[in-house]
Amino acid sequence: MIDNYRDLIPADFATDSRVWVYQSSRLFMMSEALHIEDLLNSFIANWNSHGAPVKGYGNLLFGQFVVLMADERATGVSGCSTDSSVRLIKQIEQLFNVNMFDRQMLAFMVKNKVQMLPLSQLQYAINNNFISPDTLYFNNLVQTKEELDSKWLIPVKDSWLAKRVTLSL
């Protein structure tokens, strides 16, 4: 079930398509998720860069992560078009009273549920076996479709977090 998100990523996008992952501070309710889906669909349908349409993709994954993707083979995404996507995410923040830009909050898959943990509490969580080296971590630093597919949901031991904490393997 966890890997099913890959089935939602469009196959016709280049592997080097740019990706942005925005993590919500909480799980969205179904009604909110449906509203977000409408916002994303509208945004993607009208996403332009210097007047040219952007081949874009947007989805809410795991009920908590807004993923935007732009295939730049046709139209490059730069300043204004990137700014418009950030405005969309800020709109989602305001509409649903969530934080979408907190990079100190980490997300893990624990017992098939997304669990949030502040970076400052990671070592404590490892020491007390709440998180193990094999726990799946949402690496929201991915930048391409290829990385979204292969490096977004990875074990803690294979992520940048492994250098920040002491893991007992």
Image (tube, grey):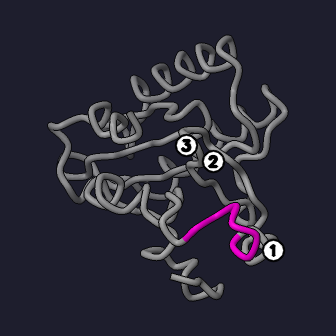
* Dominant secondary structure (helix, strand or loop) of the stretch shown in magenta: loop
> Which label sits on residue 23?
2
Residue name at image x 56 percent, y 88 percent: 163
Residue holding disc 3? 85
The label shown at residue 96 is none
Q: Name the secondary structure under disc 3.
A: helix
Residue kind at label 2, given as amino acid type: Gln
Q: Quadrant of residue 128?
A: bottom right
Residue 47 visible in the picture:
yes
Seen in the picture, residue 142 relative to 60 is either above or below; the reply is: below
Dot 1: element: helix
Q: Give the CA distance from mark 3 to mark 2.
A: 14 Å
Disc 2 packing (10 Å; few <14; some 14–19; many ≥20): many
Q: Earlier in the sequence, mark 1 or mark 2?
A: 2
Whether label 1 touches label 3, CB < 8 Å:
no
Q: Residue at x 67, y 60 (%)?
A: 106
Tell me the residue at 52%/50% (across/down).
21
**For the residues carrying marks 1 and 2, which lies nearer the camera in this image?**
1
Choose between 126 and 137: the one closer to the eye.
126
Residue 109, image x, y percentages: 56, 49
Give the mark nearer the N terminus: 1 vs 3. Answer: 3
Q: Which circle marks residue 120 in the picture? A: 1
- Front residue of 123/164: it is 123
Q: Is residue 84 visible?
A: no
Q: CA distance from mark 1 to mark 2?
A: 17 Å
Front residue of 13 and 104: 104
Q: Nearer the viewer, mark 3 or mark 2?
A: 2
Write the start and end of the magenta stretch as one range.
126-132
